[in-house]
Image: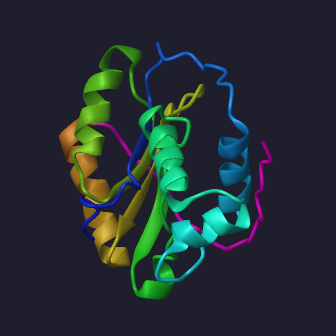
Amino acid sequence: MDNSSSPSKTTNLSKSRKCQTVELSALEKQLINLLQHGLPVCERPFAQIAKEISSTEQDVIACLTKLRSEKVLTRFGPMFDAASLGGAFTLAALAVPEADFDFVTEQVNSFEQIAHNYRRDHDFNMWFVIATESTEEIDKVVQAIERKTGLKVLNVPKLKEFYVSLYLPV
């Protein structure tokens, strides 16, 4: 699965990065709230959104570009169900020695199949999603990560799917 042109690879691993409070404009709040419910499927979705919030297509695009560049929005794009498209995915974790964390992060993120990678305050301190074209490829990627890092991967495949409608109003 080629994710090279997709903005879906998200990394939030820097321990030194502090959480910052950002003041959002009324337009930014409207867009964040509205887009959590989906993007219109039409020829000009940003024009449709602009119409719904009494703005312009140019202002909507500029605002979203700003939110992405300032990392207020870390991901903006479709969410695909890999399994329904014939692919596969799994949640995985590593227990990474603190001294090696940045190096292992680079190693893990070098795999095109890594969709997300996050630091956690736990013995398993690196959690990531592996998205592939097949279940067999997941096993190959897990083995390759283990060879490359010298660490054992905890593979936590989905057993049952639950739909959680997450909405975080701003």
Return the x and y of residue 145 as percentages of the image width and height: 26, 48
Viewer-closest of 80 and 36: 36
Q: Answer with left or right where residue 88 lies relative to residue 99.
A: right
Examine the rendering and report whether any part of residue 38 can be seen. no
Stretch in magenta: 151-170
Return the x and y of residue 151 as percentages of the image width and height: 32, 37
Based on the displayed image, in which of its 4 quarters is residue 164 positioned? bottom right
Task: Report the number of discs.
Answer: 0
Which image quarter holds the N terminus?
bottom left
Q: Is residue 115 above or below residue 109?
A: below
Residue 169 sits inside the magenta stretch: yes
Q: Is residue 89 above or below residue 156?
A: below
Q: Residue at 67% x, 50% y: name it.
A: 32
Based on the displayed image, in which of its 4 quarters is residue 95 positioned? top left
Q: Residue at 44% x, 49% y: name it.
A: 116
Examine the rendering and report whether any part of residue 128 can be seen. yes
Viewer-closest of 77 and 113: 77
